[in-house]
């Protein structure tokens, strides 16, 4: 009987390990995308930037000019009209939000 109990305890341990792996997967829900483009307009008061960017393959987007929201006002220091930039952005509530500028 001790062997059965030992086997059951081992299975419980395996189940717990599987559960521990689940929470990190939930953190992946917010996908970040990257684009390279040129700043066409920046409006810190409105919290938005207009970029003429190249294709974004992950979203099947062609090259286009569009307006993004900007997550943090400090990012506007790098969003200078006429300057080429690499940005990271996420989709939030149906809008695209720049989260990083390189």
Image (cartoon, rainbow, N blue to C red):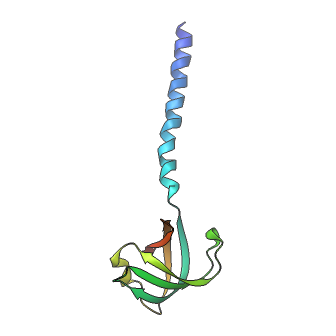
Q: Position of residue 102 (x, y in %)?
A: 45, 78
Residue sticking out furthest to the front: 94
Tag count in the figure? 0
Residue at the image position 56 percent from the left and 12 percent from the top: 4
Residue closest to the eye, 59 or 17 = 59
Q: Position of residue 33 (x, y in %)?
A: 54, 69
Residue closest to the eye, 89 or 102 = 89
**Picture layout, residue 33 above or below residue 23:** below
**Picture layout, residue 17 above or below residue 58:** above
**Picture layout, residue 20 above or below residue 73:** above
Residue closest to the eye, 16 or 96 = 96
Residue sticking out furthest to the top: 1
Q: Position of residue 96 (x, y in %)?
A: 49, 72
Residue at the image position 63 percent from the left and 78 percent from the top: 55
Residue at the image position 51 percent from the left and 84 percent from the top: 51
In the picture, the quarter occupied by the N terminus is top right
Q: Position of residue 100 (x, y in %)?
A: 44, 73
Residue sticking out furthest to the bottom: 82
Instruction: Report whether residue 102 is seen.
Output: no
């Amino acid at each position: 009987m001790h062997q059965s109990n030992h086997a059951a305890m081992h299975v419980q341990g395996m189940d717990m390990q599987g559960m521990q792996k689940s929470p990190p997967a939930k953190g992946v829900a917010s996908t970040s995308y990257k684009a390279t483009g040129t700043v066409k307009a920046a409006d810190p008061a409105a919290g938005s930037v207009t970029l003429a960017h190249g294709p974004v393959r992950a979203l099947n987007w062609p090259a286009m000019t569009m307006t993004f929201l900007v997550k943090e006002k400090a990012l506007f220091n790098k969003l200078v009209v006429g300057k080429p930039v690499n940005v990271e952005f996420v989709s939030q509530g149906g809008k695209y939000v720049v989260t990083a500028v390189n």
